Amino acid sequence: MKIFFTTVILFIFSAVLYAADGMKMTGVFDSTLKLGKTADSGDSGGEFIYGIEEYANIRFRGKIGEKAEFYSAFNLIAASGIQALPIASDINGGAATKISAQNYAAAIELERLYFRIVNENTGFDAGLMRLAFGYGSVFSPSDFFNPKNPLYPDARPRAILGGLFSFYPNDDSNLRAFAAAPPNPFSTSGDGFKAGISGERHLKNFSVQSLYVFESPSDTSVSDSATSAPNGVHYFGASIKGDTFVGIWTDMLYSLNPATHQNERLQEFSASAGLDYSLPQLHLYFLFEYLFNGSYSITAASAENQNAYRSSHYLYSLTRYNASDFTNISLSAIFNADDISFTPIIGFSTSLFQGMTLTLTTQVPLDRSVFDNGSSNGEFGPVQSGLNFLFTVKTEIRF
């Protein structure tokens, strides 16, 4: 472990020295403090909790000749309290080296490591990289490898180990073919290997993207971890956005497992639709988005993804007031229409100086138990979420 940490430090130092010869280093440093109170449970009145995290994402980019580039990024994390819990669980599934000291836990996590070769109309990427799809602002089901969840706005998108070939017929279109290794990195059989194609077309006020992915046969499927997929799984995605007097978009993914769910095909479907609108004269911005979550879809909760959605219908809304070019106040909420539970979040953000931002947020889980003496607990309610409230202070520095 000491050798690994020493190697990373030497790598940073060497990269800084090499910067004059074409290597560029950028990064983000976050310092976060969280204070909250756990929900009342039975005879327990709950307890106050805290969390502290120091997080740095450091990225390197280097030119290789005239047509190739090298990219790498890793995370440095030190945390205590509730912020240290993800480190104990491998940082939500990430590859990390961990240590525990007297009053903190720490980790180094490899985030990106890939190269890119670009010609006039083609490009090739290979390594540990991010593959993003879809135009959804809040939910985005077709973002195949990293479906979003507004309850976790600070979640860091996972990378995949694979390859991507891109073809650009013109400035407004692209075609991509890609492949990704199975979810289990220790599998030698290739079960769960994914390969797919996508296409994208941009017009003046309109864009469309389509997606097809095949997952090779395996004992388990991402769409339903409890069901085998002896014939593989087919994923069909589409995303559309338009920009008129309001911005509109829709994003959808259908997960077809031929061996299962014969009478529940709709439950293999997930889709979102939203709109946003600005009133510059009043310094206001509005956003609304709806999600349908099929119980066997890519956005559904499973043994591998406990933080995903458990019900069928969700709404998200955001109202933001821009007090100035550097300060804004927001009120957002995610609402479960099936069990009438919701989580309002009040936010305040200001730029202290160029490159540094201070953000304050307060999150309060609520459900029908607030009004009916605790007889009904919803997905986003205080008992299910484990919290009565959560207050967060975060400073972010970009360099």
Image: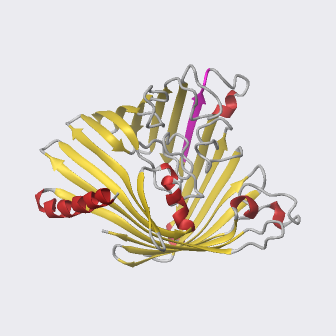
| Left or right: 344 as drawn, with respect to 128 | right
| Left or right: 140 as drawn, with respect to 44 | left
Pick the residue in front: 382 or 169.
Answer: 382
| Residue 284 image-quadrant placement | bottom right
Pick the residue in front: 143 or 74.
Answer: 74
Q: Residue 196: x, y in percent?
A: 43, 29
Please name the residue shown 45% across and 48% down the image.
Answer: 158
| Left or right: 63 as drawn, with respect to 250 | left
Q: Is residue 266 above or below residue 365?
A: above
| Left or right: 133 as drawn, with respect to 61 | right
Q: Main secondary structure of the magenta part?
A: strand
**For the magenta stretch, what is the residue range?**
249-258
Q: Residue 101: x, y in percent?
A: 44, 70
**Which quarter of the image is occupied by the C terminus?**
bottom left
**Which quarter of the image is occupied by the N terminus?**
bottom left
Pick the residue in front: 180 or 168.
Answer: 180
Pick the residue in front: 267 or 48.
Answer: 48
Please name the residue shown 83% across and 63% down the image.
Answer: 369
| Residue 254 image-quadrant placement | top right
Q: Is residue 150 above or below residue 326?
A: above
